[in-house]
Amino acid sequence: MNVLGARESGEKFRLAVKDLPYEIEIPFVTMPSKDGGVKIASFNLVGQIRLNQDLGKLMAAQIREAIGDMEGVAILTVVEKALQITQVVATDLGLDAVAVAYNRVKPHMEAESRPVIQVGSDSITSGSKFLAVYERDLNLLAEARGVILIDDVVSSGGTILGLADLMHEIGRQRGKEAPEILGIFCVAQEGDKHPYLPAPLHSLATLPKPVRQTK
């Protein structure tokens, strides 16, 4: 089976994931930049129901093996591409809720009257952006004995470092040590691992390194 086959034109990369009984066809795209752009294999899980279910079960098994006892452990993820797979993972692990970092402060957070933490981050696909966590998820994270970070793809590490900054701010504002980040889990690692990631990185597969395009 080829989940993404025949729906996008152009050059493709075929991603093989251990224990997944089919390959995933991923289009190459060029992300614009001032000096000509960066060519990447654009792995987009949004809307891919079966793919999220299959990969989520594999990731949940990886988390069980790496973390062990999940009692008191919370999951922190980001909108939007990692949210579906995180929900599958959490369901498989028996968790009732996960914490979500949004890409901006939203009206339902009531930032004027409720606690909200926002930090800046950078990623290859999104560029400079903000990550925001509001009261409900702040409490979930603050009460945890440890936290797992989940993203779809880890490349430059900017998003993960932004999530780590959020955890640091939670501890600072609560006047105590933030819960330990126990591990970072993603579907695919892209390129070289960032040397300053806050915890061990676990991935199901590897994407090709981004290629700088010149004008």
Image: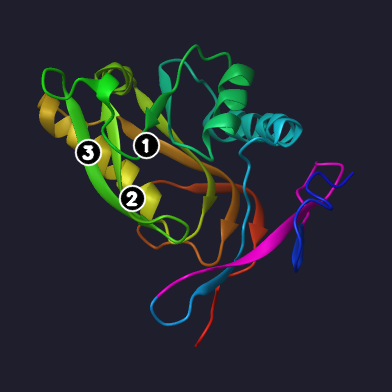
Taking 18 as reference, is 202 left or right?
A: left
Q: Identify the mark nearer the N-term, 2 or 1.
A: 2
For residue 118, which numbered disc appears in the image? 3
Q: Identify the mark nearer the N-term, 3 or 2.
A: 3
| Residue 49 colored in magenta in the image | no
Q: Residue at x 90, y 44 (%)?
A: 1
For residue 161, which numbered disc appears in the image? 2
The crowd level at tag 1 (other Cα within 10 Å; few <14, some 14-19, many 20+) is many
Front-most of residues 184 and 13? 13
Q: CA distance from mark 1 to mark 3?
A: 18 Å
Q: Please tell me whether mark 1 sits on a helix, a strand or a loop.
A: strand
Colour option used: rainbow
Depth check, mark 3 against mark 2: the one in front is: 3
User: What residue is disc 1 on?
Assistant: 181
Q: Please tell me whether mark 3 sits on a helix, a strand or a loop.
A: strand
Taking 13 as reference, is 109 left or right?
A: left
Residue 19 x, y percent position in the rendering: 80, 41
Front-most of residues 213 and 65? 213
Residue 38 x, y percent position in the rendering: 51, 73
Q: Residue at x 15, y 18 (%)?
A: 114
Q: Is residue 140 visible?
A: yes
Q: Is residue 198 visible?
A: no
Q: Residue at x 71, y 29 (%)?
A: 53
Q: Please tell me whether mark 2 sits on a helix, a strand or a loop.
A: helix
Name the quadrant containing residue 84: top right
Q: Amino acid at mark 3?
A: Gln
Magenta region: which residues?
A: 15-33
| Residue 16 colored in magenta in the image | yes
Q: Is residue 78 above or below residue 13?
A: above
Q: Amino acid at mark 2?
A: Leu
Q: Residue at x 28, y 35 (%)?
A: 132
Q: CA distance from mark 2 to mark 1?
A: 11 Å
